[in-house]
Amino acid sequence: HTAAFHGGVRRAPGGFGRSWNGLLHRDRGGRRAPDRPRAVALLEQLAHQLPATIVHPFNDPFVIAGQGTVMVEFLEQTRDLDVVLAPVGGGGLLSGLCLAAETLRPTLKLYACEPAGALDAMESVKQNRIIPMTNPVTIADGLRTSLGDQTLPILRRCLAGFFVVEEQEILNAMRFAYEQLNLMIEPSSAVALAPVRAATQRFVLVMIASLVFALFALQIFLAIVTAPIARL
């Protein structure tokens, strides 16, 4: 969660820097929350004390709308875009992409990519209820959260499907981006790249198999054609 201050920076009693630092980092004084419910309670307490407005990182209509501008840029830069893959954690980015695509290019298909060790979004969409992410096991730490009541209905309505990504595939995608694209990407981003690499590899294998079959068929054809000639 993020705290946004009314009217720019508003100083709390005793000076903004000292007060804010003391409120957020007093783990030695027992202020660090051990779990999500108590973290939310502490955040609400801090927002009341400062005062500040809580801005949810993904389950907020304005945040979702802001994320949708990414799709606007995609469509401006790529005229023939027909499929988009995106990682999903809380679903804010993907919901924004979905809403923008729904308006600007309804035929575009969007797929959610989720780590195998944190499949709450896929289950939530299947069951039409938020499945809490209790014990995520994935290197993609940005995708360890659960969907919200704002993002779930959007994803249910708009998604074409899900890609489940294994941990090794995430690592392989990160290495590919670094070695072949000269990009250093975080694991959460690699979750969306991994299915593309897998599909490319499958396509190459299909092409090789097709070529081998074609050569084999050509060999049989030539053998049949040249057999009568050999008997003359």
Image: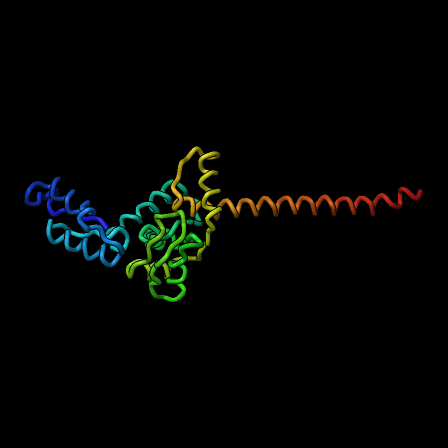
Residue farthest to the right? 232
Q: Residue at x 42, y 49 (%)?
A: 85
Is 221 in front, or is 145? 145
The residue lying at 44 percent from left, 56 percent from top is 162
Q: Is residue 153 left or right of residue 54?
A: right
* Horizontal and vertical percent position of residue 40: 22, 56
Q: How is the image coloured?
A: rainbow
Residue 58: percent from left, percent from top: 28, 52
- The foreground one among 185 and 125 is 185
Residue 211 is situated, as x and y percent measured from the top left of the image, at: 67, 44
Residue 182 seen anywhere in this rendered image of the structure: yes
Residue 189: x and y in percent read 39, 44
Asked if residue 110 shows in the view, the reply is no
Q: Outermost residue toward the left?
A: 13
Is residue 179 shown above or below 119? above
For the C terminus, give its image quadrant: top right
Residue drawn 44% across the image and 54% down it: 116
* Residue nearest the observer in this picture, 73 or 47: 47
Residue drawn 15% across and 47% down? 23
Circle count: 0
- Residue 127 occupies which quadrant of the picture? bottom left
